[in-house]
């Protein structure tokens, strides 16, 4: 069974590892490129000329920056540079939007393809059309336009003068979209705050799954072979550290998205936006269609038509507007309740707890771990008095040596046998009482007598034993017949054994037939009065065999019942003293184990074997060594001590590991259960609380919503 | 002379011939007087199955041809002689072991001897 568990576990671990690898290795496309809907890589790579022209353009642009403010400003994140992925050329057909920075200096424009900022060589403004076929490549910051409507960067440097023109000539037919009537000022570009970042952050499901995997790996390490345990433990630690780091790390600068702080006048266009977000997307700032969080809907109108500061992501999602609407403050006062990870951890902890219950014996590890925590002692005992003086406790190491009596297993004969059946030498009675007497039984002796006389007559050692004349003996021998030369003795011994009327009926009737008698009492009477003495009975071989079987069956039934009652008699140890048992069923005596079970013998051999074993095991030297796992006293005043062989280092670590895992799992169930309930309740009325807070902001006469 | 010339006379030998006993190691048989009715003859031990019996001892019967001129001895007479003897031993049956012709027996030119066991079979 545990083999199946190990195989399943390894497969499960590999599957999770492979899934994690696939998620991690997903091509990391820069977020800004990803949003250009019609973008697709052109089936060609960057040529050497284009690469040289791009490098040269970077240098010229850097030189112009130092000498002339007119050079196209470089993006906030520093200079442009080619990267390994710059070889792929991306082509798009899209309108180009230009923003003027909030200053009067010319060329302070920023160009956007939809919501993706791109770097456009300044001299190409004149070639911008309504829909532009643009080829661009990735750089280490924002994408670089290398071709616009057929004009390539290769020709750009040779055609353009070294010094950029003094002011941009707005070609009459250029249909670059200027802000129609309202100047949207880009006040600043900032990074989102940790709180804003947390709004969109994942619900921690991946981290919860990692921790669940850690719990399962720790469970598997309790069952796996020793050679696999280090790998499982290492994997568990790695996943735990990785999960913990992902869960509790502060968002890195790179992962925090840019937020454009704009100032303008939001207007509602009365149209339903193309997308299915209904009225929500009909508010726009200049030409930017703003996307609001759904729960801001009732409060947006307050800022319409007024000069308002609006912070948006590049994908036009609003994060802050006006004095009050702010995701940042929402997260501070009404944090998002991420309860999914608690749910996942709760389920995985419950699963591991069930697996522990099903596959790992919990009682012993817990018991021993607690005992070892309280300090265990080593007890050496070579006599009962020492044992009685010792203050034994669970977890103590005991080494007992002396003479005792093996436990008697009076279980059913066909039950699981012990090597010394009916004795179970994995348990020893150790007391100061005299050893029990060997099993003895008159009935068995009578049965033995009958068997002996039958055997002597049916299987005579010599052909003539003097009871009949040699001539008759040899005649009988020649004829192959079997002679019962002391028939009277068989009758007498049968009568002695089967004294009750109902005993040995078949045997009795057979003997009556052989003796040509009227009935059993009659031939018994003749046997007793001597008239049967000297009578010989001749049998065919078949009849002899039948008679032998009848006698064997008759005697064995008596012997078996006598054996059973003898065993029951043996199973009455003297009161007091100790019963030391091995948990694992190890034999505590040093005798050679018998070849078979007692019940493999039949008839009289069974009784003899019982006597042999009794003589060996009723008073036998023993040695019991191990850790005490259970202490108790029975009604007879005998103190029961259960021992488990001294666990090796691996077993000790498995015990401790089991206890720790059980503790972790139980704590995890409690903590995640409580958090789950709390977060579920809070997240249910989070939106209502936020709206009540905004209502109190926009309507000062309303009761102030309680904030942190 | 009649004493000498009774050719078919079966001289019963009440006891095993002292010397030249044809059945070596045969114990001395009982002294018994031939009885009027012969014991039942069993030729084979198997016939005794189912008939408890007592062993009364070995028994013999023989007929003697005194000299060459006389008629040869008869096995059946020897057997009958044995049966009679068994009956004389209070046996009601006799198990025949074997019969054979013997020569060079004192007083007999040739002798027919039968050996068996006298039995008392329970009825």
Image (tube, rainbow, N blue to C red):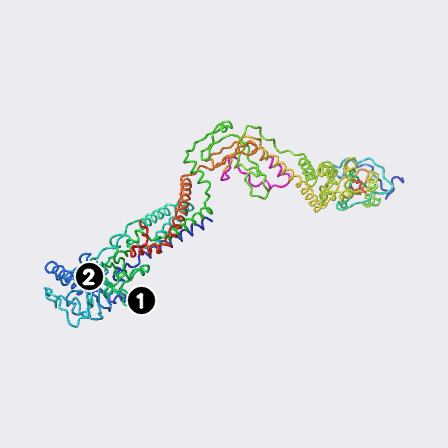
Q: Mark 2 points at which residue?
A: A185
Chain for numbered disc 2:
A
**Residue B9 visible in this rendered orientation of the protein:** yes
- Give the label, 2 or 1, closer to the camera: 2
What residue do we see at 22% from left, 69% from top? A133
Please, is residue A5 above or below residue A571 in the view?
A: below
Q: Distance between the residues labelled 2 and 1?
A: 26 Å
Residue A67 forms part of the magenta stretch: no
Tell which residue pokes out farthest to the right in this image.
B2
- Classify residue A320 by image quadrant: bottom left
Residue A587 forms part of the magenta stretch: yes
The tag on residue A275 is 1
- Circles 2 and 1 on the same subunit: yes
**Residue A62, percent from left and from top:** 13, 59
**Residue B42, percent from left and from top:** 79, 45
Q: What stretch is highlighted in magenta?
A: A583-611
Q: Nearer the viewer, residue B88 or A284?
A: A284
Helix or strand or loop: what does disc 1 sit on?
loop
């Amino acid at each position: 069974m545990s083999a199946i568990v190990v195989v399943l576990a390894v497969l499960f671990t590999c599957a999770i590892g492979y899934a994690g690898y696939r998620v991690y290795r997903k091509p990391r496309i820069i977020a800004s490129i990803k949003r250009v809907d019609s973008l697709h890589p052109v089936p060609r790579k960057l040529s050497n000329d284009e690469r040289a022209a791009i490098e040269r353009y970077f240098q010229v642009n850097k030189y112009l920056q130092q000498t002339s403010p007119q050079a196209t400003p470089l993006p906030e994140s520093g200079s442009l540079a080619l990267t390994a992925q710059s070889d792929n050329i991306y082509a798009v057909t899209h309108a180009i939007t230009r923003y003027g920075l909030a200053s009067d200096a010319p060329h302070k424009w920023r160009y956007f393809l939809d919501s993706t900022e791109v770097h456009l060589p300044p001299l190409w403004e004149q070639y911008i059309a309504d829909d532009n076929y643009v080829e661009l490549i990735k750089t280490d910051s924002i994408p670089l336009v290398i071709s616009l409507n057929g004009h390539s960067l290769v020709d750009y440097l040779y055609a353009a003068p070294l010094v950029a023109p003094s002011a941009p000539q707005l070609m009459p037919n250029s249909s670059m979209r200027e802000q129609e009537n309202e100047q949207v000022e880009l006040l600043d570009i900032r990074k989102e705050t940790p709180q804003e970042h947390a709004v969109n952050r994942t619900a921690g499901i991946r981290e919860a799954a990692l921790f669940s995997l850690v719990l399962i790996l720790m469970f598997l390490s309790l069952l796996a072979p020793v050679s696999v345990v280090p790998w499982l433990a290492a994997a568990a630690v790695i996943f735990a550290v990785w999960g913990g780091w992902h869960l509790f790390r502060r968002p890195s600068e790179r992962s925090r998205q840019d937020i454009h702080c704009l100032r303008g006048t939001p207007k509602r266009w009365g149209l339903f936006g193309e997308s299915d977000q209904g009225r929500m997307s009909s508010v726009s700032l200049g030409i930017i269609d703003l996307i609001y969080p759904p729960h801001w809907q009732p409060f947006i109108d307050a800022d319409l038509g007024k000069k308002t500061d609006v912070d948006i992501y590049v994908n036009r999602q609003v994060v802050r507007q006006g004095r009050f609407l702010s995701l940042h403050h929402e997260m501070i006062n009404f944090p998002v309740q991420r309860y999914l990870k608690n749910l996942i951890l709760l389920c995985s902890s419950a699963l591991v707890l069930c697996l522990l219950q099903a596959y790992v014996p919990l009682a012993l590890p817990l018991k021993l771990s607690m005992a070892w925590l309280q300090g265990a002692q080593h007890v050496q005992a070579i006599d009962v008095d020492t044992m009685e003086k010792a203050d034994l406790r669970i977890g103590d190491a005991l080494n007992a040596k002396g003479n005792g009596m093996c436990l008697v297993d009076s279980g059913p004969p066909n039950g699981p046998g012990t090597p010394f059946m009916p004795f179970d030498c994995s348990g020893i009675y150790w007391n100061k009482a005299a050893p029990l007497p060997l099993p003895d039984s008159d009935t068995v002796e009578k049965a033995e007598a009958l068997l002996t006389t039958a055997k002597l007559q049916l299987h005579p050692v010599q052909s003539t034993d003097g009871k009949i004349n040699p001539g008759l003996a040899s005649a009988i021998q020649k004829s192959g017949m079997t002679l019962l030369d002391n028939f009277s003795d068989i009758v007498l011994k049968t009568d002695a054994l089967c004294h009750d009327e109902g005993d040995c009926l078949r045997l009795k009737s057979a003997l009556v037939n052989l003796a040509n008698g009227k009935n059993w009492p009659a031939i018994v009477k003749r046997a007793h009065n001597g008239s049967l003495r000297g009578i010989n009975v001749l049998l065919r071989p078949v009849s002899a065999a039948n008679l032998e079987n009848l006698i064997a069956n008759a005697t064995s039934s008596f012997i078996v019942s006598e054996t059973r009652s003898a065993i029951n008699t043996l199973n009455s140890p003297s009161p007091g003293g100790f019963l030391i048992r091995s948990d694992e069923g190890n034999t505590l005596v040093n005798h050679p184990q018998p070849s078979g079970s007692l019940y493999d013998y039949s008839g009289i051999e069974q009784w003899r074997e019982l006597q042999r074993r009794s003589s060996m095991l009723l008073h036998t030297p023993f040695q019991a060594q191990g850790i005490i796992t259970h202490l108790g006293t029975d009604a007879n005043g005998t103190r029961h001590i259960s021992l488990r062989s001294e666990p090796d280092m691996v077993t000790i670590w498995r015990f401790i590991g089991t206890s720790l895992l059980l503790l972790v799992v139980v704590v995890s169930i409690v903590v995640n259960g409580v958090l789950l309930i709390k977060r579920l309740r809070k997240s249910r009325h989070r939106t209502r609380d936020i709206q009540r807070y905004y209502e109190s902001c926009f309507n000062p006469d309303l009761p102030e919503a309680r904030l942190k | 002379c009649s004493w000498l010339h009774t050719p078919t006379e079966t001289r019963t030998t009440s006891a095993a011939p002292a010397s030249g006993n044809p059945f070596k190691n045969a114990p001395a048989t009982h002294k018994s007087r031939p009885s009027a009715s012969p014991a039942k003859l069993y030729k084979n031990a198997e016939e005794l199955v189912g008939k408890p019996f007592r062993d009364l001892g070995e028994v013999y019967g023989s007929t003697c041809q005194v000299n060459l001129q006389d008629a040869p001895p008869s096995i059946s007479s020897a057997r009958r002689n044995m049966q009679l003897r068994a009956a004389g031993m209070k046996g009601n049956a006799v198990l025949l072991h074997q019969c054979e012709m013997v020569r060079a027996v004192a007083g007999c030119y040739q002798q027919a001897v039968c050996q068996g066991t006298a039995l008392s079979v329970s009825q």
